[in-house]
Image: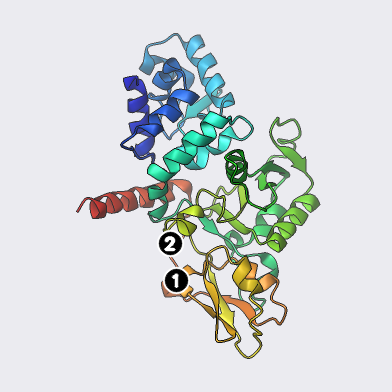
Amino acid sequence: MSSVYKRLAEILDRIPNGYPATESGVELHILEKLFSQEEAELTCFLELEGLSPQVIAQRVGWDESKTFMMLKSLVKKGLIQAERGQGTLNFKLIPFVIGIYENQNGKMDEEFVFLFERYYKEGLHKVMDIKPAISRVIAINAVIPMNVEVMPYESASYYIENAKDWGVIPCICRQQKRMLGEGCRHTSENCLVFSSRPGVFEKAKDIRALSKEEALDLLKKAGEEGLVHTVKNYQNGVDFICNCCSCSCAILRGISEYGHLNAVGKSGYVVSIDEGLCTGCSICVDRCQFKALQIVDGVCKKDESRCFGCGVCVLTCPTQALSLISRPNETIDPLSITEKDWQEKRAVGRNDFIQDNSK
């Protein structure tokens, strides 16, 4: 394996999201599949902050025209990101998750899905247990208590209502598991994306454009299906809502398969049970993605440590024995305002995690 892939892997692992090394080196085989050696070399000179093609060309020692063309090719392949700069496009690194992996939607082949699954089990799942989590749960709007103030960043419908363009893509996690022959019963086309700029999804190759009404309806149906709304784990810059299940979602599998209760951030709510109304029907138990509920002596009981406040159980309770209530303030982790704030906290969390696990 070329040393350039090892260098790129180390750089991706320095991103707070993480790209941990494994004994088998499967993470290097993933990079070898995604990047040519020349592309990997170029990517090693990028940063999380956008850089102009001129600066990047100077760093790598290449002609600016060649550098620019390859950077655009890397963006098209979903391996880096472009953003508007001063009179030009700037280019920057993106993490493996959420980032490079999700951008392979529609590009995966059998080799890639097996490599990813192997990497997930050998190493990637470990970074799901680090605080602050990569993503967070937001509650289904229909079951949020009427008597509490709902902050904008806690409302799925707020993001949809305030966007200017909407689209939907297939869930890459369900696609990956189905290609492995391990697909679940949940529908696939329900990962919502949105933008503050109108018309951006109309000609997008891998995104089906939606109206605002269609996006809100899709969100409603996802909740009815028992899927959990998740978004970026900071307040500003949220541009997607994933509708996740613990059988396929790479992040929620950290909880269901490895017991990583830090894998996703909790909403500001927690389920409350009126045992006098509960008939022990177990519908909620079957719907809970986090295994937070069980029937004991004919009534529903909760494990509060496993309740992430999604509201999936509340939505279909036939006797209205379940409701969401505000989570005590002292149990809520402060939510970062920006992605940069989150990255700084996550870097500290990763360092603490590594130190704890090296003892």
Q: For mark 2, what is the residue?
A: 261
Q: Quadrant of residue 167?
A: top right
In the rendered image, which quarter contains the N terminus?
A: top left
Q: Relative to 13, does residue 332 appear above or below in the rendering?
A: below
Q: Secondary structure at mark 2?
A: loop
Type of amino acid at the residue the image marks with label 2: Leu
Residue 346 placement (x, y as % from top left): 38, 50
Q: Nearer the viewer, residue 269 or 339?
A: 269
| Label 2 crowd (10 A; few <14 / some 14-19 / many >=20) | many
Q: Quadrant of residue 169?
A: top right
On the question of residue 311 being in view, the answer is: no
Residue displayed at 48% across by 68% down: 306
Residue 337 placement (x, y as % from top left): 48, 54
Q: For mark 1, what is the residue?
A: 305
Residue 249 placement (x, y as % from top left): 55, 50
Residue 151 placement (x, y as % from top left): 59, 65
Q: How is the image coloured?
A: rainbow
Q: Which mark is residue 220?
A: none
**Which sits earlier in the primary sequence, circle 1 or circle 2?**
2
Q: Nearer the viewer, residue 108 or 68?
A: 108
Q: Relative to 276, does residue 198 appear above or below in the rendering?
A: above
Q: Relative to 278, does residue 88 appear above or below in the rendering?
A: above
Please count the marks in the image.
2
- Asked if the residues shown at circle 1 and circle 2 are in contact, with their CB atoms under 8 angstroms apart, the answer is yes
